Structures are given as structure tokens and as C-alpha cells.
Image (cartoon, rainbow, N blue to C red):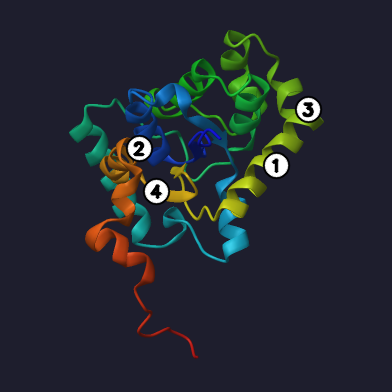
Amino acid sequence: MAAPHPHWYFDFVSPFSYLHWQKLRRLPQARDIVPVPILFGAVLDQLGIRGPAEIDGKRLFTYRKVQWQAEHEGVPLRFPPTHPFNPLPALRLCIAAGTTIHAIDAIFDWLWRDGLAGDTAQALEPLAHALGLDAEAAVADAAVKAQLRANTEQALAAGVFGVPTLEIGGELFWGNDAHGLMETVLADPDWLHRGEAGRLAELPVGIRRGGA
């Protein structure tokens, strides 16, 4: 039986997803990776945690880190007018467009390269038109909404806790700065089970906060 294709879980609200997409699509294995747009906010709600942009102090640090990573990696980046923003219209537009590489590129570029708003169907209408879609219809489509919910439920079932996350053979690799590790595991999945890396899966928990 062939190994399942790696799945890449992402949300357009995440600048780290934008940065990681630039590297992911250049991988030799890129054509085998299945991109899965999800609603990151629903993941946070389910896990009972807050995103970095929702924590005072961490928000500005995270934005500076994003900007530094973009400049360090040679990726053009300009923040949208507000952040966090409602990513539902962009996610639904992506799904309506077939979650193709072209659509993902176009939406990421609109939001994070050009710094344009994408939090309403009206804001995305020029982009939707370029993709051959009507933004209002795409965002309101019941099948599209259902697919986004299914994608998010799939991510939660897989154990996803942040975006971007690459799932390789049931193992999760999170974050733009984990790209090198992802490359290693894609090329050599057995690395996870050798030496000290292999021992980590059985490392005992020494203490837990908040009680027993």
C-alpha cells in the first residue's frame, strides 16, 4: 500500500503560513503534498488556547519576527490593513477555486505580499474575478462552507495545534522555522526513530502544571 500523501494545514490569517508556502512549493516532493485550508481560530477554540496575536506583548514580538524572517528569506511581505483579521472569506474563496496552487499563490500574494484586505467578499472581489469566480457567491456557497468545516475537523482529528503544519505519515511538523526538519523527514522518515530522536517519543513527563 502506498504511503499517504503529506498534508499541509494552513490558514491565510497566518503570516508564517505565507512564508512557509514559498519554501514548501519548491520542494522536490511538492507535487505530492496536499494543501488543506483550515480555520485556525476554530482550532484555538477547540484547544482552549490563544493565538500569538491575541496575547499582549507577544503580538508585536511575533510581527517583528515575521518581518525579520521575511527579510532574512528574501520574501516580500507587507501586513494587511488589520491583523488578526477574519480569514473566512479568503479560505472559502480558496476552496471555491479548487485549492489549486494558483489560487493559494494568488490569495497569499493579495494578503501578504501586497498587504490588501481580505476579510470580506467585497474586498476580495477583484481577486475572485481574476480567479474566474464571483466572490459573494463563493463565500456564501454551502458546499464550500461544509468543506472548510470538514478540513478543520480533519486537522483537529490529526492533532493539529498550529499553522502551518505539515503532516507526514501521521507525524506533525509545525511552523515556518521547522522547514529544515520537514525536509529531513520527507527525505528520510526513519530519522524520527533513530538515536536520540527515536528516544524522545518515550520521554517521561516529570511534572505537570495545574494539579495531578
Task: Work out whether mark 2 precedes mark 4 in sequence or the reverse, and give the earlier one.
Answer: 4
Cα distance between the residues tagged 3 and 2: 36 Å
Q: Are marks 2 and 4 in contact (CB under 8 Å)?
A: no
Q: Mark 4: which secondary structure?
A: strand
Which residue sits furthest bottom?
212
Q: Which mark is residue 150?
A: 1
Q: Are marks 1 and 3 in contact (CB under 8 Å)?
A: no
Q: Which of these two is toward me, 179 or 202?
A: 202
Q: Report the residue marked by disc 3.
A: 141
Query: Residue 159 in the image: x percent, y percent?
Result: 54, 56
Q: Amino acid at mark 2?
A: Leu
Q: Amino acid at mark 1?
A: Ala
Which residue sits furthest front?
1
Query: Residue 184 in the image: x percent, y percent?
Result: 27, 41
Q: Amino acid at mark 4?
A: Phe
Image side of residue 66 versus residue 109, left or right: left
Front tag of 3 and 4: 4
Task: Work out whether mark 4 precedes mark 1 in sequence or the reverse, and give the earlier one.
Answer: 1
Cα distance between the residues tagged 1 and 3: 14 Å
Task: Work out whether mark 1 precedes mark 3 in sequence or the reverse, and give the earlier one.
Answer: 3
Cα distance between the residues tagged 3 and 4: 32 Å
Q: Are marks 4 and 1 in contact (CB under 8 Å)?
A: no
Task: Work out whether mark 3 precedes mark 4 in sequence or the reverse, and give the earlier one.
Answer: 3
Q: Are marks 3 and 4 in contact (CB under 8 Å)?
A: no
Circle 4 Cα neighbour tier, 10 Å, few/some/many (<14 / 14–19 / ≥20): many
Identity of the residue drawn at 56% across and 16% down: 127
Q: Amino acid at mark 3?
A: Asp
Task: Work out whether mark 3 precedes mark 2 in sequence or the reverse, and give the earlier one.
Answer: 3
Q: Are marks 2 and 1 in contact (CB under 8 Å)?
A: no
Q: Report the residue marked by disc 4.
A: 173
